Image: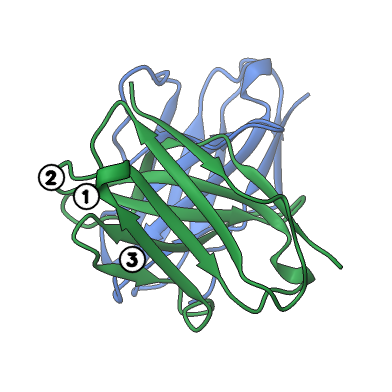
Amino acid sequence: QSALTQPASVSGSPGQSITISCTGTSSDVGGYNYVSWYQQHPGRAPKLIIYDVTHRPSGVSNRFSGSKSGNTASLTISGLQAEDEADYYCDSCTRSSTVVFGGGTKVTVL
Amino acid sequence: QVQLQESGPGLVKPSQTLSLTCTVSGASISDSGYYWTWIRQHPGEGLEWIGYIYYSGSTYYNPSLKSRVIILVDTSKHQFFLRLSSVTAADTANYYCARVVPAPIPYYFDYWGQGILVTVSS
């Protein structure tokens, strides 16, 4: 199984909105509404921020939102804040009941 | 609050078997529907799913690692385990255990351990 494709880096100024894409195939992202997103700060474990494409776990800021179109899922961070500077990963289930991650995107707040 | 804690040797020699334990507290490994997983992250790189296990013992593995991986569970000890055989330097990574939310397809992870760095070197 091939990793999902994410841009290596995305940047934005405080207050702006940024979007991170996660592209797969019809066998994973495009085949199911089962995409999740994780935020990882340096030296820390990843934290779940979006699941089932659009759902936020309790306690996660509503500045994080998810969407999907075809084989590409997206994470949007609105009202960018300094604390949002981190690595972000998407994942999806696959047709063979396995899990595949994206390569990760480094978000920089300018 | 669900907590997971990885433990095991931080240094493994090439060709040997990497063995890690994940101890779960605040929840039962037998909780209906939840799977339990291992994920690794090579230094400075992205996340790689290794595999997951259900309390009954059913397992699913990453095809790229399947020939070398075994994941086991001991519900009485609230623990699950990773065994990765014939390791090389390419298996040097931070290894995480996590809980997998089940419904309707297990694919996302709501609680994570802090991770344990395992270095493969002679």
Residue B109 position, x and y percent, is 38, 44
- Residue at image location 68% in from the left, 27% down from the top: A85
Q: Position of residue B110 (x, y in %)?
A: 36, 37
Looking at the rendered structure, the kind of residue marked 1 is Pro
Q: Colour of chain A?
A: blue
The label nearer to you, 1 versus 2, is 2
Tell me which numbered mark, 1 or 2, is placed earlier along the sequence: 2
Identify residue type, mark 2: Ser
Q: Element under label 1?
A: loop
Q: Secondary structure at mark 2?
A: loop
Q: Chain of mark 1?
A: B
Q: Are marks 1 and 2 in contact (CB under 8 Å)?
A: no
- The answer to which quarter of the image holds residue A15 is top right
Q: CA distance from mark 2 to mark 3?
A: 28 Å
- For label 3, the SS is helix
Image quadrant in which the C terminus of chain A is located: top right
* Residue under numbered circle 2: B32
Q: Is residue A52 visible?
A: no
| Above or below: residue B50 compared with residue A64 | below
> Residue at 57% of width from left, 34% of height from top?
B114
Task: From this view, report whether residue B3 is shown above or below residue A15.
Answer: below
Amino acid type, residue under disc 3 in the picture: Gly
Give residue B102's mark. 1
Label placed on residue A30: 3
Q: Colour of chain B?
A: green
- Calculate the distance from the C-alpha at mark 1 to the C-alpha at mark 2: 9 Å
Residue at the spot 60% in from the left edge and 49% down from the top edge: B8
Residue B37 placement (x, y as % from top left) = 40, 54
Determine if residue B101 is in view: yes
Determine crowd level at label 1: few under 14, some 14-19, many 20+ residues with C-alpha closer than 10 A.
some
Distance (Cα) linking label 1 and label 3: 20 Å
